[in-house]
Structures are given as structure tokens and as C-alpha cells.
Amino acid sequence: NAYGAALSWPEPPTGAEHKPGRKAGALVVLVDGELTLYMERGGKTLLCWPADPDDPSLRAAAEALAAAARAGTLGTVTVERVNGATALTSPLARPLETAGFVATPRGLRLRA
């Protein structure tokens, strides 16, 4: 991940309550070299670029994130907030659910 070292982080998505950063345990997903997802350490918060839930790169990034969780790289992940909104009501929940995340009372969960 070159962000935060060689490359500046992009502005946070609209509505996001925090900025991405180079932190142990944080995860970035690039699609065609573009930053698409940032998952904070612990997986509770997800930042998404772009904000359009129908963008094909977002679907590809959600599928890559789900594949990493299923492979055991991440363990069980429960996303509680997406771009500052509750994950369950976020328009960005649809690509995550399509990739295999399941709605729970706490958020969108994917078990390893």
C-alpha cells in the first residue's frame, strides 16, 4: 500500500467521520490501481470510493474483500459503518451483500 507513504490519501468520502491512515491491521483494496475500499483495523468501519453503489469497481472490491475473509486472511468481519452511515441502511450495503456479507443486528457480517 503506497497510500500515506508515497501517495497522499484522497479526501474521505462524503459523510465519512474519519480519514484513512497507514495503521497496522488496516486494509486497502485497489481495483485497476485505484483506491476503492479502506477497512479500518478491526473491520468495523469501511470507506468506499466511489460512492455509487452501482459502480463495477465497488462490486469487484467487495468481492475481493469477501474472498480475503473466506480465505481466512481477515477472520470474521462485521462492518458497522460505511462512509459514516450505518452499514445496514447504507446504499453501499448492496454490493457487500451481493459479495456474501449477511445482515445482522450489529451490521454486515462475513464469517471466515
Image (tube, rainbow, N blue to C red):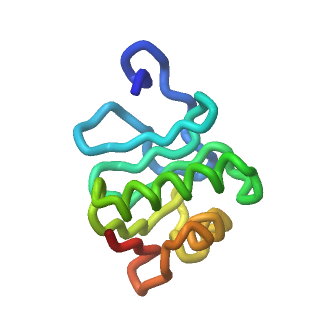
Percent position (x, y) of residue 49?
62, 43
Q: Image point 49% across, 20% down: which residue?
A: 8
> Residue farthest to the top?
6
Q: Which quadrant of the rendered structure holds the C terminus?
A: bottom left
Between residue 47 and residue 101, name the one nearer to us: 101
Between residue 100 and residue 35, name the one nearer to us: 100
Q: Image point 52% across, 60% down: which residue?
A: 82
Between residue 109 and residue 107, name the one nearer to us: 109
Q: Image point 41% across, 74% down: which residue?
A: 109
| Residue 108 placement, left or right of 22 | right
Judge whether 16 appears above or below 109 on screen.
Answer: above
Residue 80, located in which quarter of the rendered image?
A: bottom left
Q: Image point 45% across, 58% down: which residue?
A: 67
| Residue 76 placement, left or right of 62 | left
Q: Which quadrant of the rendered structure holds the N terminus?
A: top left
> Residue farthest to the front?
71
Percent position (x, y) of residue 107?
44, 76
Percent position (x, y) of residue 64?
50, 52
Residue 59, located in which quarter of the rendered image?
A: bottom right
Judge whether 12 appears above or below 86 on screen.
Answer: above
Percent position (x, y) of residue 43?
35, 58
> Residue farthest to the left?
24
Q: Total marks drawn?
A: 0
Residue 74, located in which quarter of the rendered image?
A: bottom left
